[in-house]
């Protein structure tokens, strides 16, 4: 009878350990996906500012129909480009297209998301994760 009780205790400990490990993994994955969603929301807001810059006349500190003169300062304050979700930067800006990049701040393999804004203000997102070190 004593061996059966020890076996049941050992099996219970193993099951609890596996359940805790699965729970931690699920929590981490949910946190990373929530961070990804927040970054995409931030990039969507920044892309609206970028398009607003394009359609604003140059006499009113806009691009006058071009993204070519877009700079980080046109997107807002430094806090808007570096928050708890990610760090944002302009990768390229030409007359008809801008590429913004966000590097996430969460997890060992943070998200790198690029947002391409075309001449009509439409967004295209490309997502990848950094390799773990």
Image (cartoon, grey):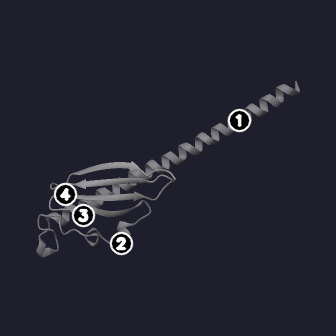
Query: Which residue is rendered at x = 83% and y = 31% of the image?
Result: 6
For residue 16, what is the image quadrant?
A: top right
Callout 4: SS: loop
Label 3 environment density (alpha carbons within 10 Å; few <14, some 14–19, many ≥20): some
Choose mark 1 or mark 4, whichever is in front: 4
Q: Residue at x 16, y 70 (%)?
A: 62
The disc at residue 14 is 1
Quarter of the image holding residue 12?
Answer: top right
Q: N-terminal of the two: label 1 or label 4?
A: 1
Distance, label 1 to label 4, CA atoms, is 55 Å
Sooner in the amino-acid sequence: mark 3 or mark 1:
1
Q: Secondary structure at mark 2?
A: helix
Residue for point 74% across, 31% down: 11
Q: Which residue is mark 4?
A: 97
Query: Which residue is disc 2 drawn over?
Result: 78
Left/right placement of residue 35 relative to residue 69 reads right
Which numbered disc, 4 or 2, marks the residue closer to the eye?
Answer: 4
Mark pair 4, 3: CA separation: 14 Å
Badge 2 or badge 3: first in the primary sequence: 3
């Amino acid at each position: 009878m004593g061996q059966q009780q020890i076996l049941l205790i050992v099996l219970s400990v193993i099951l609890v350990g596996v359940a805790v490990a699965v729970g931690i993994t699920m929590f981490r994955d949910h946190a990373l996906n929530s961070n990804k969603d927040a970054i995409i929301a931030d990039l969507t807001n920044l892309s609206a500012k970028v398009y607003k810059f394009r359609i604003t006349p140059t006499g009113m500190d806009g691009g006058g129909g071009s993204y070519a003169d877009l700079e980080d300062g046109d997107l807002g304050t430094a806090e808007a480009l570096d928050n708890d979700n990610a760090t944002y930067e302009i990768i390229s800006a030409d007359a008809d297209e801008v590429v913004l990049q966000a590097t996430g701040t969460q997890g060992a393999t943070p998200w790198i998301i690029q947002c391409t804004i075309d001449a009509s203000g439409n967004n295209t997102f490309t997502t990848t994760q950094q390799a773990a070190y």
